[in-house]
Amino acid sequence: MSNPYLDIVADHDKILQSKDAPLFSSLDGLNLPARAPVADDAPVVMIFAPHPDDECIIGALPLRLAREAGYRVVNVAVTQGSNLKRQPERWVELKNACDYLGWDLRETIPGGLMSVGLKTRNDDPTAWAEKVNAVAKLIEEYQPAVCVFPHDNDYHSAHIGTHFLVVDALKQVNHRCTVALSEFWRQMEAPNALIATTVTDTADLIAALACHVGEVERNPYHLRLTGWMADNVRRGAEVCGGQGVAAPEFSFGTIYKVAQFDGRAIADNDRKYTIAEQDDIKAVLA
């Protein structure tokens, strides 16, 4: 008997090596997902994305809150990348991605912040305070019920910097809300929430990610996203669900650490959440 998994692996390899997967430099001719009207008084979930494209990678929870609970999603482009020449192009790509998902988009400052990292926070308090003020103004404007941003050890300097930038801004305006810390470049030590996405929601996040043409041409994050999300389910089954529990039956998920910001700091809790496709997404906020 030949190896029965050879064809499965070969099919997966074919997807990852695909040169024909479409990228979307424009939304012209592309059918946008249906979007219900957002109420004027809808609660807001804000994504603080270190770079254009991060919003799609960590966007499972915001997408479900919008589609299932009527939240308004506001994606804040903390930076627009370090390559000044490509920033205008990245902004167009980012707008296409947010338009595809039905999300609002805001800049921190024109062109985005630069040098968002612990070096600036530690060595240049004046420059850091200006960055914190820019984010604090957006928090005061939108009064978010939920803020999504990277955890404090997510490897990339801009991801780590974004974590402390948002925490400092929340503290400055004494804002209370739910926070959902995300991971991508480095896993968290103690996440507590595994959020499933349906095939449709997962495909929409990938399509939005495919709007970031320049980035996925450099590194095909969009083709690898399902593999990452499948591994999140493998790991999240135990680190979020509990050691030895039965694995969830859904295929794709994103891991977060959900906690409360009490106006001064992140207040951890002991709860663990595994939210399947059919579960009430608002349960993760309870």
Image: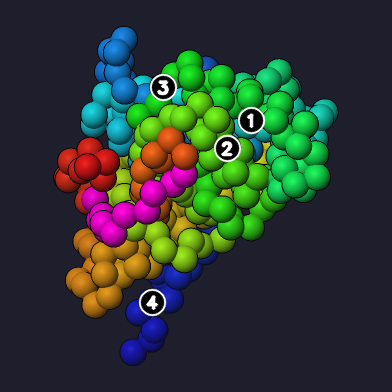
- Disc marking residue 123: none
> Which residue does the numbered mark 4 point to in the structure image?
5
> Which residue does the numbered mark 2 point to in the structure image?
168
Indicate the secondary structure of the residue bearing disc 1.
helix
Front-lying residue, 23 or 184: 184
- Would you say residue 272 sits in the magenta stretch? yes
The answer to whether residue 236 is visible is yes
* Residue type pointed to by label 1: Val
* Residue type pointed to by label 2: Asp
87, above or below 268, in the image: above
Q: Residues within 10 Å of mark 1 (few under 14, many from 20)?
A: many
Callouts 2 and 1 close, C-beta under 8 Å: yes
Q: Earlier in the sequence, mark 4 or mark 3?
A: 4
Front-lying residue, 147 or 211: 147
Span colored in magenta = 265-275
> Which residue does the numbered mark 1 point to in the structure image?
132
Measure how far apart labels 3 and 2 are at the Cα level. 15 Å
Residue at x 53% of width, y 21% of height: 138
Indicate the secondary structure of the residue bearing disc 4.
loop
- Would you say residue 199 sits in the magenta stretch? no
